[in-house]
Amino acid sequence: MYTPLAAGTADCFFCLLLIICGVSVLRPDIPWRIGERIRRVGAGALLVPYAPEETVQYSADALAALPAAGAPMLVNADYPIADDISGGDMADYAGSGWLVHPLLGADYAALCAAVEEATGERLLIRDAFRSRAEQEARYAADPVLAALPGTGEHETGLALDVCVTGYGGMSFLKTRAGRYVNNTAWKHGFIIRYPIDGEAVTGKPFEPWHLRWVGAPHAEIIHRSAMTLEEYLERLGEGWFSFGGTLLLTRQPMADVYSVPEGAKPIAASPDNTGCVVIVCRYGAER
Ligand SMILES: [Zn+2]
């Protein structure tokens, strides 16, 4: 039988249920947390597929003659580096004694300047290029933490482990510089290579200190789309064309000739260590 008290009690329970459910439903919308990427519907949406009506061909030699630019090469357990890369190919970063890939020095200097201006803290390198012999020694000493020789990015000179004095490893995120780097390194061509939610893809837990230079526009697309480098290359596909902002990107198996849409002008071409080449083109009004 209906009584106002019973109805009131039921309403209260209903309200309580709504509040509990509401809180749990809202939790995924908690604003972006530092160093954490939240998988979202539409991740990767910055890459828009494109089907050109006409393509033209460029020779491998013509693309190889383009100035060196980004480096979206994938190095992991599935795609190790075939050869020992010589330290002689590296550059001493700003007289620090740290050897880095020559392509990333200017971007890293710009990142350091931006960090200092925004946070007042000084970004420092803890580790950079490692020779194959160094990696073998580390692996022999600690096969759990150290990457199998050939499968670690430090052997390419494209990866940097950074810190603030007294704050290395996970505690890097306790510093303003650490949080700033994790949110904005992409503006200088770097990605957080092993993001917090990427272990299932990368095979490595979150490393907020490990920066990997891939260069523009790759870093921006990877960061803003909340992808790992593995997912980015997969998303580019093989033989596909995609717009990433105003630039046109295509990833194609290594060959003597490559196709790009008519009207597109290749500006960079980089082998990705998976047997493909990633080509970046200006297109349309950007030409
Ligand atoms: Zn590292």
Image (cartoon, grey):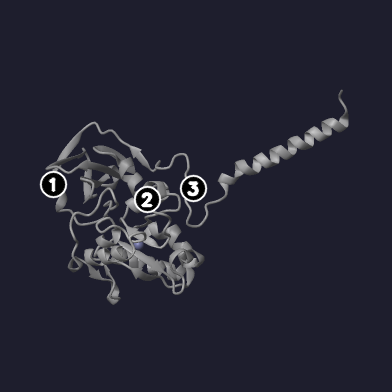
Q: Residues within 10 Å of mark 1 (few under 14, many from 20)?
A: some
**Number of numbered markers:** 3
The part of the image, by quadrant, that contains residue 144 is bottom left
- The answer to whether one can see residue 177 in this image is yes
Locate the N terminus by quadrant. top right
Which residue has dot 3 on it?
38
Q: Earlier in the sequence, mark 1 or mark 3?
A: 3
Which residue has dot 1 on it?
60
Q: Is residue 79 placed above or below 10 in the rendered structure? A: below
Badge number at residue 276: none
Q: Position of residue 4 (x, y in %)?
A: 87, 30
Q: Nearer the viewer, mark 2 or mark 3?
A: 2
Q: Nearer the viewer, mark 1 or mark 3?
A: 3
Q: Which of these two is toward me, 251 or 210?
A: 210
Kind of residue sitting beneath label 3:
Ile
Element under disc 3: loop
Q: Image check: 127 left or right of 43?
A: left
Q: Which of these two is toward me, 88 or 285?
A: 88
Q: Earlier in the sequence, mark 2 or mark 3?
A: 3
